[in-house]
Amino acid sequence: MKIIIVLLGLITIFVAFQIYVIMSTKKTEVQKYTIIKQYNDFEIRHYPSATIATINSNAKTYKELASPGFQKLAGYIFGGNETSQKIAMTAPVQMVIDDSNSTMSFVMPSSFTNNKLPQPNDSNVNITTSPDEYVAVTTFGGFASDKDIKKYSEKLLTLLKDNNLSTMGNFRLYGYNPPYQLFNRKNEIVVAVYWNP
């Protein structure tokens, strides 16, 4: 009987924590965009330029990039900068996994611009401005993996070809949830497209 009570208590704590995480994630600032056109399995968005913190990596897989990249960027926003300033986390975390150069980026809160941000203590963290761009986006749930990234990138490429849309640059993974959030996860595959507004 005691074991059942303990198990029920642990399950209750776990469920409460997951609800708290989901509610906290909903309060996170999300990079602003405008939906330009909705298709059956993807959409075209316009993203205005934004200030981003980026690390470059020679990682060849999601697993190799995710944890080390996140630690470096989190170190910067949690006070690893010239003024020890804490900067709010935003969503999504952006990743490009490429054989020649992989990157991970955090979008800075909209209240910051390049000249308002403190310089990183880690020279591997670069503060830049992303381009104003039109992108195609498809969404999937769960925990992302290299298999998922390949699958949904190929799916999106096929959908774009079927709709006579051309891509430019690498496919990216946008992740919206912390690793300890187990439910209601959201990921996106994103690629820049040629689009005449």
Image: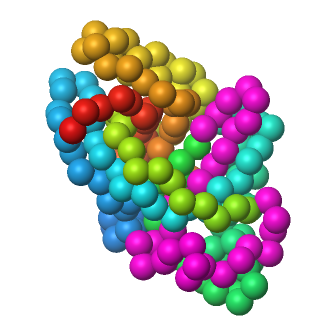
- Asked which colour scheme the image uses, the reply is rainbow
The quarter of the picture where residue 22 lies is bottom left
Of 17 and 5, nearer the camera is: 17
Whether residue 112 is in magenta: the answer is yes
Magenta stretch bounds: 96-124
Residue ID at (65%, 56%): 54
Q: Main secondary structure of the magenta part?
A: loop
Task: Determine whether, in the image, residue 2 is placed left or right of residue 139.
Answer: right
In the image, residue 141 sits, relative to residue 54, either above or below, namely above
Of 194 and 89, nearer the camera is: 194
Residue ID at (46%, 72%): 109
In the image, residue 171 sits, relative to residue 85, either above or below, namely above
Of 110 and 149, nearer the camera is: 110
The x, y position of residue 20, in whole percent, is 39, 69
In the image, residue 57 sits, relative to residue 195, either above or below, namely below
The x, y position of residue 181, in whole percent, is 48, 55
Placement of the C terminus among the 4 image quadrants: top left
The x, y position of residue 196, in whole percent, is 25, 33
